[in-house]
Image (spheres, rainbow, N blue to C red):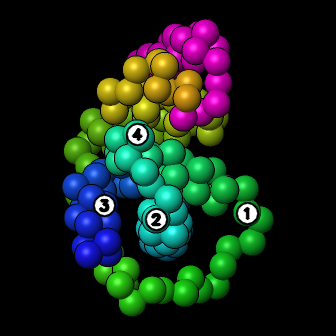
Amino acid sequence: MIENSFLQKVEEHKGIIYKMINLYADDDEDRKDLYQEIIFQSWSAYARFKGDAKFSTWLYKISLNVSLSFLGKQKKQNQINKIETFDYYFEPPELSERADWLYRCIRKLTDVDRSIIMLHLDGFDNTEISEMTGLSRNNTNVKLHRIKQQLASLLTGK
């Protein structure tokens, strides 16, 4: 069934969602809300997924767009309507101290810079990153170089 296929693919690529919620949500309640919204939006768009891109790339783009929209909202929703099928919540894995430090430094970057560096760290090449973010390839190259310099400075405290 379509539903089972979707749930299996989400389970295989849930790390993408965790990266987004850890980068764009400040507390546990916001993380839960953002997780639910990413799942809901992904499920809503799944019927249009044609397989032209890898599922991970498709899920990354949806997760990024939902996360950025989440940030832009002024008011928090009091309650998200849960779809029975998606009323479970994956418990995110504990982050090591080094990973936690890296996430804290990445969170200090601008929203766009955060998404670019996470895509890079996840192994996407600059062409794929430019397609997902809507930036030119040259702009992506320059931004990525500057982001790495900024992160090095943040990580070393210089």
Q: Which residue is mark 3?
A: 10
Q: Nearer the viewer, residue 97 or 146?
A: 146
Looking at the rendering, the stretch of residues picked out in magenta corresponds to 132-158
Q: Nearer the viewer, residue 87 or 42?
A: 42
Residue 56 appears in view: yes
Q: Which residue is mark 4?
A: 53
Residue 73, label in figure: 1
Q: Position of residue 34 (x, y in %)?
A: 51, 65
Separation of marks 2 and 4 at Cα, in angstroms: 14 Å
* Residue found at x 68% / y 73%: 76
User: Where, by quadrant of the figure, is residue 57 drawn?
Assistant: top left
* Residue found at x 22% / y 55%: 12
The quarter of the image holding the N terminus is: bottom left
Q: For numbered disc 3, what is the local secondary structure?
A: helix
Q: Tell me if residue 102 is in the magenta stretch.
A: no
Separation of marks 3 and 4 at Cα, in angstroms: 15 Å
Q: Please determine whether, in this image, residue 143 is positioned above or below residue 58.
A: above
The amino acid sitting under disc 3 is: Val
Q: Position of residue 124 (x, y in %)?
A: 38, 27
